[in-house]
Image: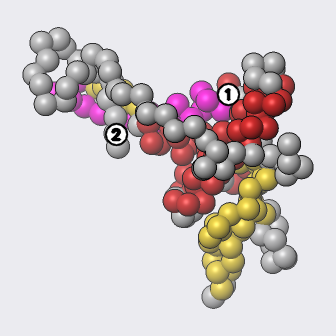
Amino acid sequence: MSTKNLNTVTLIDGLPTTLGADTVYYKTVILRPATVAMDLRAVELSERIVYIEGKPKLLLSDEMYRVAMTMLRIERFVADGSGLGDIDHPLIDLKMMGRLSPQDLEKIEQQTALMDLAAQVRYGNITQEEFDDFFNATPNTQKKESAPQPTGEAGDVDEHADQSRPAVGRLD
């Protein structure tokens, strides 16, 4: 396995921060392992109450949950060589996450997924060899498999369904 630190991500664009008339970019992110508390907090951050036909309904946004969970995994942003202090976890919020480029957000998400996979080695759910194969894989060495197809009670979106739908939906 590579000696790369799994808890560190170098961003492509960086988190822009205005300092006087200048813009400084935080280019390094330090991550932390997931906890159940993070998962519960991400659910809270992604829930909204909406009123449908005068009745309150609780909606959960999958997209907001994903961003919230990623945000909670960040220990700090580091502005390398700028002389600025780190932005530590308690100061990071969803508004700040919105300043990241889509590419940087994806890079952070990929690294958290890799950290989770490494945890599976630690817990004995996969072997070190399986992890190394995944970690060192290139697009040409990865198996090409068809993606799973969506199924479930929703059926075809264009078809009229005879059964009622759950009150939970998506905001995004």
Residue at coordinates 80% horizontally, 47% vertically from top-left? 7
Q: Is residue 95 left or right of residue 138?
A: left
Mark 1 or mark 2: name the one nearer the start of the chain. Answer: 1
Residue located at (27% from left, 16% from top): 153
Amino acid type at circle 2 is: Leu
Query: On the image, which quarter does residue 161 sit in?
Result: top left
The residue closer to the viewer here, 152 or 21, is 152
Where residue 29 sits, quadrant-wise, is bottom right
**Location of the N terminus (image quadrant):** top right
Magenta region: 37-55
Residue shown at the point (12%, 25%) measured from the top left: 159
Front residue of 126 and 166: 126
Residue 49 can be seen, yes or no:
no
Q: Which mark is residue 152?
A: none
What colour scheme governs how the chains and residues are painted in the rendered image of this protein?
Answer: secondary structure
**Residue at mark 1 to residue at mark 2: CA–CA distance:** 23 Å
Q: Position of residue 163 (x, y in %)?
A: 17, 11
Which quadrant would the C terminus be assigned to in this image? Answer: top left
- Tell me if residue 138 is in the magenta stretch: no
| Residue at the image point whose x is 80% and y is 24% from the top | 127
What kind of residue is marked 1?
Ala
Q: Quadrant of residue 78?
A: bottom right
